[in-house]
Image (cartoon, rainbow, N blue to C red):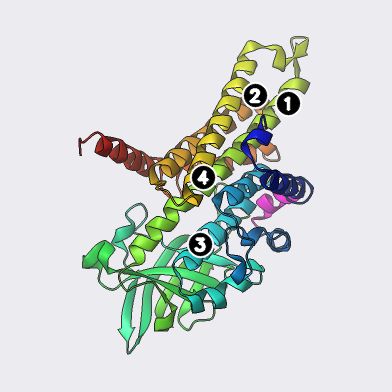
Amino acid sequence: MPQDALLLTEQELMLQHTVREFADQTLAPRAAELDEREEFPWENFRALANLGLLGLGIPEAYGGAGGGFRESSIAMEEMARACAATSVIYGAHLSLACQAIARFGDEAQKRRHLPPLVRGERVAAFALSEPGAGSDAASLATIAGRSGDDYMLSGSKLFITNGDVAGTYVVFATHDPALRARGISCFIMERGTPGFTATRQGGKLGMRASTTAELLFQDCPVPSEDRVGEEGGGFSIAMQVLEASRITIAAQSVGIGRACLEAAARYASQRQAFGQPIAGFQAIQWMIADTAVEVDAARLLTRRAALLKDAGKPHGTESAMAKLFASEAANRAANRALQVHGGYGYFRGSAVERYFRDARVTEIYEGTSEVQRLIISRAVLGRLGNV
């Protein structure tokens, strides 16, 4: 990547080098097989813990490595370039579930839950989406009823990353659906809670080694001390966590885009047609140039959002911009890379075929492209006094 020495600190460059080396040597060789088998990569997850990557952005007092979204974005990009599915697991565990506990949990909750998550002894999941509540997160139907001083959760969640393997769940439920956002609370729940089941959802298009599950809650008891924040404050927690986590999805998209760019450039330099490498044809050169520009622009948007977040500044619009542009750039990069590879890229076993499938979901999860455009347009129009 050009000019990184000017954009990153010496410590960040060391992190980048460490994760890139790990990704090349450990993640990339396993990626195709794990995708084919749709198998959760336990070895990868434990290796992330051993490197201290599960503690990025988590205070040292709870076993973390400190730092912030600048560091986690660097790690995410390098991981996604090698194995996008592993980066999904990492993002859901750290940027969603662990960040929710670290930012909004009380001292007892942080001391109890964060250390084993940082050490990789447990996987974490962030349980927000439901069959009838995706982009409209305020319309949750999972109920948090009262049982004395404690709560009973009843309902279901869908498309929950890490849901079938997690030991710790950050769950959002409503006390009254009619209250919409004002009725939602956040809870920490552990695997083994009576009435709780997790069923894996197979058959995904991409990110196949990142397992996804449907969660069912049948009168699941949750002690009141495991409620995160105030009663009715869950929607705000979810939105703030998602706002920040979009930075890591942008970084993930940059990593996928990089993988596409590098694969296309290598293949174009080797593939012969009409007596010369196809890299000598302007049509191919322009596809590679467009991808290079868009991946670099996406990275800079991502770094700006991370800088703002780590500085404690408003970053919602910038995170939405980074996520929107980077995810769409990754899909364009994957499309171009497959086009450069021609028929060879269209078959299973081709790396670019996997990149093409993996890239697609980045425009959907943690806020669709349409939702990001709503966020951005409202911010722009609001500044201009039109709404």
| Residue receiving disc 2 | 340
Q: Is residue 116 above or below residue 131?
A: below
Cα distance between the residues tagged 3 and 2? 40 Å
For the residues bearing labels 2 and 4, Cβ distance under 8 angstroms? no
Whether residues under marks 2 and 1 lie with C-beta atoms below 8 angstroms apart, the answer is yes
Q: Earlier in the sequence, mark 1 or mark 3?
A: 3
Q: Nearer the viewer, mark 4 or mark 3?
A: 4
State yes or no: residue 239 in magenta: no
Q: Secondary structure at mark 4?
A: helix
The label on residue 307 is: 4
Asked if the residues shown at circle 1 and circle 4 are in contact, with their CB atoms under 8 angstroms apart, the answer is: no
- Magenta-colored stretch includes residue 37: yes
Kind of residue at badge 3: Gln
Asked if the residue at tag 3 contacts the one at tag 1, i.e. Cβ–Cβ closer than 8 Å, the answer is no
Q: Residue at x 47, y 77 (%)?
A: 196
Residue at 71% x, 40% y is 349
The magenta span reads 29-38
The Cα–Cα distance between marks 1 and 3, rounded to whole angstroms, is 40 Å
Amino acid carrying mark 2 in the image: Val
> Counting other residues with Cα less than 10 Å from the Cα at mark 1, is it few (<14), some (14-19), or many (20 or more)?
some
Q: Residue flagged by tag 4: what amino acid is it?
A: Leu
Q: Which label lies toward us, 1 or 4? A: 4
Residue 333 appears in the picture as rendered: yes
Mark found first going from the N terminus, 3 or 2: 3
Q: Position of residue 270 (x, y in %)?
A: 78, 22
Q: Amino acid at mark 1?
A: Tyr
**Pointer 3 residue:** 99
Q: In terms of depth relative to the viewer, which is nearer, 261 or 164?
A: 261
